[in-house]
Amino acid sequence: MRPRHRFARYIIVAAGSLLLALLVGTCILVADGLHDRLGVADVGLVLGNTIASDGTPSPRLQARLERTVELYRGGYFPAVIASGGIGKEGFDEAAVMRDYLVSHGIPADRVIMDNRGATTFMSARNTVEISRQQGFHSVFVISQYFHLPRTRLALERFGIPAVYTAHARFFESRDIYSCPRELFGYLRYFLRHYDSGAT
């Protein structure tokens, strides 16, 4: 075989192996996220997402909030941390989330706002800080299925001893690229540094 042809074959094999690894990794991540880890926790954590231009939660965020209300009513946690940042639309995600939760029956004094949760990492770090202040030792996370493994990883790396999860019942076409993209996000979080003593 000519050197040029041999090199081309190596490239094809390497590219195929990389694509296979991406496919397998994405499938594992999706299966993990769809497998709810139910358990009674000290607090629920619902992660923010887009707020519509009229100030209401986007369908994706609404699905997270609906699942949070369902789990709260089911007795899985007695309080909720609503974590989000200020989106490009200019709305405080945590405030909008709190208003939705309260309007659906969760008492206002049972909702803890974290409006500094602009990223998953920041939400996890802030949740740990809140947990230390409130004496929480377990957290129940609600988000999209593909987002849950990375969030659980961050909370565990920050020192939360028990993390439970449940996915929002909302699926859309953009999940097709969100899932493999999330795999790279998980790997990045796996490799990054966590200061368990940070406040």
Image (spheres, grey):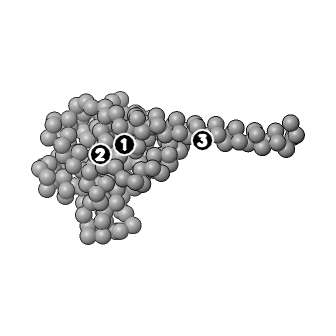
Where is residue 87? Give x, y as percent: 37, 63
> Is mark 2 in CB contact (under 8 Å) with mark 1?
yes
- In the rendered image, which residue does mark 2 sit on? 168
Quadrant holding the C terminus: top left
Residue 29 pos. (x, y %): 45, 37
Identify the residue position indicated by label 3 in the image: 19
Three-letter residue code for mark 3: Leu
Give, as a three-letter code, the residue at label 1: Tyr
Going from N to C along the chain, the mark reached first, 3 or 1, is: 3
**Vertical relation: 53 (above or below) 167:** below
Residue at left 60%, top 41%? 19
Q: Amino acid at mark 2?
A: Ala
Q: Earlier in the sequence, mark 3 or mark 2?
A: 3
- Image mark for residue 145: 1
Residues under labels 3 and 2: Cα distance? 28 Å
Residue 106: image location, x then y, percent: 14, 48
Q: Which class describes the residues within 10 Å of circle 1: few (<14), some (14-19), or many (20+)? A: many
Image x and y of residue 118, in percent: 40, 55
Query: CA–CA distance between discs 2 and 1?
Result: 7 Å
Q: Residue furthest front?
A: 1
Residue 19 versus residue 55: which sits nearer the camera?
19
Residue 46 vs 51, above or below: the answer is above
Front: mark 3 or 2: 3
Quick one: label 2, few (<14), some, or many (20+) residues within 10 Å?
many
